[in-house]
Amino acid sequence: MAGVSGRQLAPVGGAGGSAVSDPSTRDRVTQLLLERGATTAAQLGHALGLSPAAIRRHLDAMLAEGDVLARDPAVRGHRGRGRPAKVFLLTEAARGRCGTHHYDNMATAALRWIARGGGSAAVSAFAAEQVSALETRCLAAMEDAGDDPLARAEALAAALTAEGYAANASTIASGGQLCQHHCPVAHVAAEFPQLCEAETAVISRLVGTHVQRLATIAHGDGVCTTHIPAQPGRVQSGKTVTTVRTDR
């Protein structure tokens, strides 16, 4: 399950950011959206060293070409005064060009053949076998992570990023959250959710506790999000605090 690995995003352009037609800048915007998921224009401009006007011109062009979508951000709890800034995320077509999807049609056809011969259980068994090698590699990378599920989630995020998933872990009021901003098999998993289920089972075993999948790229969400419940006796701050970012 190999995907595209994150690459370092060096600042481009000056504060004025006048060279908005530079293809390399467009590539950097695309890569940042791939790694972070839904992001505001201000956040993109800050990361890339571009002025708000410059990043807007890039985003407007990408909107016109169908490479990005603009949405209102999800707001939990009380909303402050004023309209929140829109967030931008890659369209499915743009995301597909970032990954390695050359064999999607063949993989889908193979899974359909397995399903016809052995049913859903056979597809599940195949999916479990496919992620077993990934589990072994991640387990080795997490050797020194200790027993705490949240610490293990951080280590797992780093291991998954090395595998091309552009992952990060964060602490939230109800426990922890593992986010994967890229899925190498999203197109196939859209038809065969057993792939997502097998991956979720791997995350649960690696973290060492029950987890819950809240969203998946395969189902049209901007990011694969896995919730890790708080452990008894652990005190959470009540705020989302990023404890490690590995989507670099």
Image (tube, rainbow, N blue to C red):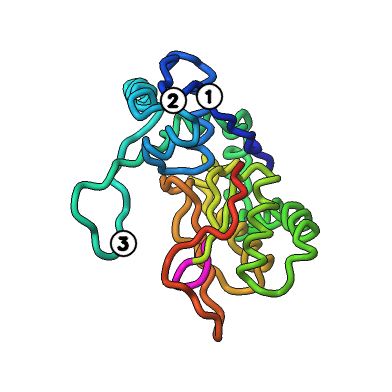
Q: Position of residue 141 (x, y in %)?
A: 77, 56
Q: Nearer the viewer, mark 3 or mark 2?
A: 2
Residue 176 in the magenta stretch? The answer is yes
Quadrant including the N terminus: top right
Residue located 51% across and 71% down the image: 175
**Quick check: 77 left or right of 156?**
left
Element under disc 3: loop
Q: Nearer the viewer, residue 153 or 54?
A: 54
Of callouts 1 and 3, which one flags the residue occurring earlier in the amino acid sequence? Answer: 1
Task: Examine the rendered structure and indicate whether residue 223 appears above or below residue 214.
Answer: above
Q: Which residue is mark 1?
A: 12
Q: Nearer the viewer, mark 1 or mark 2?
A: 2
Around disc 1, counting alpha carbons within 10 Å, would you say few (fewer than 14), some (14 to 19), or many (20 or more)?
some
Q: Position of residue 55 (x, y in %)?
A: 39, 27
* Kind of residue indicated by mark 3: Arg
Quadrant including the C terminus: top right
Residue located 70% across and 45% down the image: 162
Q: Which residue is mark 2?
A: 15
Of callouts 3 and 2, which one flags the residue occurring earlier in the amino acid sequence? Answer: 2
Q: Magenta span covers which residues? A: 172-177
Around disc 3, counting alpha carbons within 10 Å, would you say few (fewer than 14), some (14 to 19), or many (20 or more)?
few
Element under disc 1: loop
Around disc 2, counting alpha carbons within 10 Å, would you say few (fewer than 14), some (14 to 19), or many (20 or more)?
some
Q: Which residue is mark 3?
A: 76
Q: Nearer the viewer, residue 83 or 11?
A: 11
Mark seen at residue 174: none
Q: Position of residue 139 (x, y in %)?
A: 76, 61
* Kind of residue indicated by mark 1: Val
> Disc 3 versus disc 2: distance between alpha carbons?
33 Å
Q: Position of residue 22 (x, y in %)?
A: 49, 14
> Disc 1 versus disc 2: distance between alpha carbons?
9 Å
Residue 69 in the magenta stretch? The answer is no
